[in-house]
Every structure is written in structure tokens, then in C-alpha cells.
Amino acid sequence: MMNPVFILSACAISPQLSFDVDKFLNPIITTDDGKLFAAEPDYRQFINPVAIRRMSRQLKMGIACGMRALQLADVSMPDSIITGTGLGSMTDMEHFLKDMITLEEEALNPTFFIQSTYNSVNGWLALQTKSTGYNQTYVHRGFSIELSLLDAQMFLNETPTSKIALVGSFDELTNDYFVVKSKCDYWKESVPNSLKLLSCNHTDGTIAGEGAAFFALTNKPKPLSCALLGLKLLNLPSSYDFTQEIQEFLSQHGVDLKDIDVAILGKNGDARFEYLYDPVVAAFDVETNVLAFKHLTGEYPTASGFALWIAVQLRHWNQIPEPLILKSGTRPKRNILVINHYILHTASLMLLHQQ
């Protein structure tokens, strides 16, 4: 079993006001059309204004979020940059494919193709920080951010000297992507207001979202850092004993379900996945704080990055925002368990401890 790693800073761009604000998820942004788009910040302090004009929203979100995470950790150049994305740059890919058809594969502008590659964000971050160290992008659907964190944990465990890894995730939503995935029964046919999503768990489907989240990780504990003790990835057949897997994962780290102070769940209002969460919630202590987040972000492959951002933010704020709470408890916010699933029958567990 690997040693813990420590989160020095966290930054998120999401459909909520989560980027450099003085309030924790207040006010809440909602939608009635089944699509939650990111609330984008002013990118000019992080990206050259000339370059901004040629960038997709995903590139801008990823670069700004990564640079801000480094600023918050007071780090100018990370030793590694490791990211995960389930979709890559959908805007640039769609633009290039449409140009291929319109121009009959002649005289194509290569910019959109170049910037649609999955590792574009990593490349830009490396250029801006002058980082020449380990640089990796994971593209693995609902496991992309988790594999990035696992790789960072291995990287930081390899050396006794202090190292910094910049780890992040990014995915964007486009109207064409929404239409395509609606044919796969990803989204609800009767769309509720996003705040009412979790109470509409008697029908199939969810709502769509997007976002970016970045974290500065180190292998040496520091004051006020949040320890990532471990994570686990699961492929879920329908008869899976999910609660038993969680118990086994926690026991490896000397923790029981009854010891969890805060649980952050990836419930998304889809009736097909309610069976995962109900037995787990019942097994928690009555004073455990149980939270949910996808009615605030929508569903996308790396949504668990936002859940991890919430876990880190809990150390800064005395009060948990009301819209997050499924069940309120009185326990201190020390042992935090993130439980997420993605539509394609994948699930992940992340265990954190506030220093």
C-alpha cells in the first residue's frame, strides 16, 4: 500500500461560482434545460490575450484552473503535470470534423486539430510554467481523474525528497455531444430543475455538465494540508456488493464506515444507479454528514474532481452549503469519503483526512 499524498491547494471551474470567490457555493446556479455550463472566469490574468482568441473553452478552463492551483500553493514550477479527461476538446474536434465535410478535406486549418488532442492542456501548462518533468494525460472515461491521482501518488512515493505534482481534470459540454448522448439514454427525457434532480430518481437519465478541477499535491505533510490516503477503482456489474467493497477499502486504511465524518456521493438522479447508494448511506453513522454534488455540476466523466474540490474546501469553511446536504450530521469534518460512479458502470472511492 502506498503512502498518503497531501493536497496543498485546490481550484475548480464549474457551473457554480467556485473560482476565486469569497463564499462557498453561494449563490447556487440552476438550469431547466438539462445542461449545466461552466461559469467561466476572466482568463486574461492567466493566459496571453492574443492566445485566448484561438482557444476552446476547455483549453482556457484547464490552463487557468491549473495555473491558479499553483498560485494558491505558492508553486511556480511543478515537478510533474498529470491530468485526466474523458472527452478531450469536443469543441475543437467538432469544428475540425465539420470543416473536413464543408471543405471536402481540402485546405483545412490545422489549428483545431492540434488543439483537440487530449494533451493540449498539459502542453500549455508545461510551457507556461517551464516544466520539463514528467507529463502525462489519462483518457479513460469515468476513471480519468482517478488514474491521474493514482499516477501522482506513485510519482510522489518514488522519492524521499519533497516533490510537487500538479494534478487535474477537464471536460467540456457541447450541444452536439448532448444530442448524441441523448440517443444513448444518458439524459432525462422530462427535465427537472437541476436543484430537484436528486428527487427525480424514479426515472432513467440525468443532466449534463462540464468543468475543470486542479490540485497541487506533495509527498510531505504541511500545515492545513488535506491527506489523500488512498483510492480504489471498481467496475460494477448489476449484482455488485458495493457496500462490502467500500468496507474492505476502508479497512485497508484502518477506518470503518462508522468512522466516516463526511461522505460525498455521486448520486445523479438516475434510477438505474440508486441501488449503489442506498445501502451505503444506511451503513453510515447517524451523525455522518452525507452530501451530493451532481445536481450542481451535471454529469460528466471527471465530475469526481469537483467532489474532491469540495472535500478540500471543507477545511476552510465552518458551514456546509445547504444545497449539498442529503443528511446533516454533527461529526467533525476529518475523515472524508468520496463515492462516485459514472454512467458506464464504473465507480471510484477516495479517502481523505483533514490534517
Image (cartoon, rainbow, N blue to C red):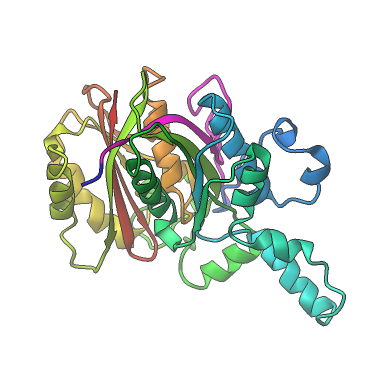
Q: Residue at x 56, y 36 (%)?
A: 29
Q: Is residue 62 magenta?
A: no
Type of secondary structure dominating the magenta stretch: loop
- Magenta-tinted stretch: 3-32
The one nearer the camera, 198 or 249, is 249
Work out whether residue 17 can be spotted.
no
Q: Nearer the viewer, residue 80 or 117?
A: 80
The residue lying toward the viewer, choosing from 215 and 320, is 215
Residue 319 lies left or right of residue 216; in this view the side is left
Q: Quadrant of residue 242?
A: bottom left
In percent of width and height, residue 202 lies at 33, 57
Position of residue 8 in the picture relative to residue 285 (left or right): right
What is the x, y in percent for residue 26?
Answer: 52, 26
Looking at the image, which residue sits at the far right?
Answer: 107
Question: Which residue reaches farthest bottom?
Answer: 104
Q: Is residue 138 above or below residue 310?
A: below
Tell me if residue 25 can be seen: yes
